[in-house]
Image (cartoon, rainbow, N blue to C red):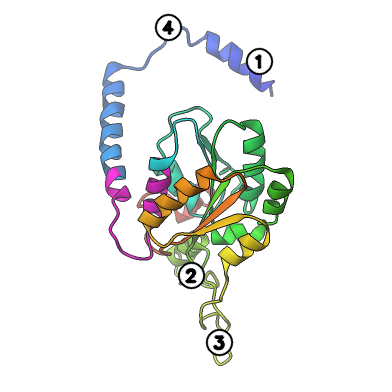
Amino acid sequence: MADAKVCLEEITGFLDGYKVLDEYRKKAAEANISWEKQVDEFFKVSGALPVTQAEVVGAVGGFAGPRDVVLCAAGSLPGDLHKLWRTTDPKGFHLEYGYSTMGYECAAGIGAKMACPDREIYVMVGDGNYLMMNNEIVTAIQEGIKYTIILLDNSGFGSIGGLSQSIGSQRFGTKYRYRDEKTGLLSGDKLPVNFAANARSLGAHVIEATDIDSLKKALNEAKKQTVTTVITIDTDLYKGIPGYAWWRFLFPRYRK
């Protein structure tokens, strides 16, 4: 046990003059270039609807300035942001991923803006997390704190649904559906959750995007606003980014 700051200061002293091997540095640089090319491919707009989560990340990342902040916490978005977001500033990437704190985003956006009032704050949140604690939008309106929420609506819980499917449970109970009276299963019609109307009722300025072009226009409009703005956009529940998912770290037995 040690004080984190003191410990780091002592360890740093042992690293004076240390550097990795040139061969390792070269391999890392090559791997980075290779991955950047893959990211470019993920960001390409296909024109298909609903859009993919990766396309949304690409649009927001392309619009955000070098000192702007993206903030996220739980669901499938943190994994995609970790792999795709191109951070250019030490404070530009705020990801609460250690505990996968569902509902953290809307509240944390307030704190991020208070800490960095000269930066644009982009809160990216899925519909599941948004429903858990969207009430803090009221606090933002009350206190005159402006930030932008990009709400990705895939009509379900994409991350836990992916885990369910990976172990053969067929995404059980992870979609916004009515319960079928005959079968007793959650396989009925889609629930009519109106996220835009909800955000308006809380006092936010709301923009409903339908594709990547309208999302880019919405981001431009949101930046000009003086009140917290919510941008809604439908996204594909199934098209994700290949690679690790959070449960492969939390539950080693699910690693492939």
- The answer to whether residue 132 is left or right of residue 36 is right
Count residues near mark 1 (Cα–Cα under 10 Å), then give few for <14, some for 14-19, many for 20+: few
- CA separation, marks 3 and 1? 59 Å
Say which of 47 and 31 sits in front. Answer: 47
- Residue under circle 2? 171
- CA separation, marks 3 and 2? 16 Å
- Residue under circle 3? 180
Marks 3 and 4: which is nearer the front?
3
Q: Earlier in the sequence, mark 1 or mark 4?
A: 1
- CA separation, marks 3 and 4? 67 Å
Is there a contact, CB below 8 Å, between mark 3 and mark 2?
no
| Residue 68 spot, x, y in % from top left | 50, 35
Please tell me the numbered disc located at residue 17: 4
Is residue 240 visible in the rendered structure shown here?
Answer: no
45 in magenta: yes
- CA separation, marks 4 and 2? 52 Å
- Residues shaded magenta: 40-61
Q: Earlier in the sequence, mark 4 or mark 2?
A: 4
| Residue 7 spot, x, y in % from top left | 63, 17
Q: Residue at x 51, y 43 (%)?
A: 223
Q: Earlier in the sequence, mark 3 or mark 4?
A: 4
Marks 3 and 1: which is nearer the front?
3
Is there a contact, CB below 8 Å, between mark 1 and mark 4?
no
- The answer to whether residue 70 is left or right of residue 203 is left
User: What is the three-letter code of the residue carrying label 1?
Assistant: Val
User: What is the three-letter code of the residue carrying label 2?
Assistant: Arg
- CA separation, marks 1 and 2? 47 Å
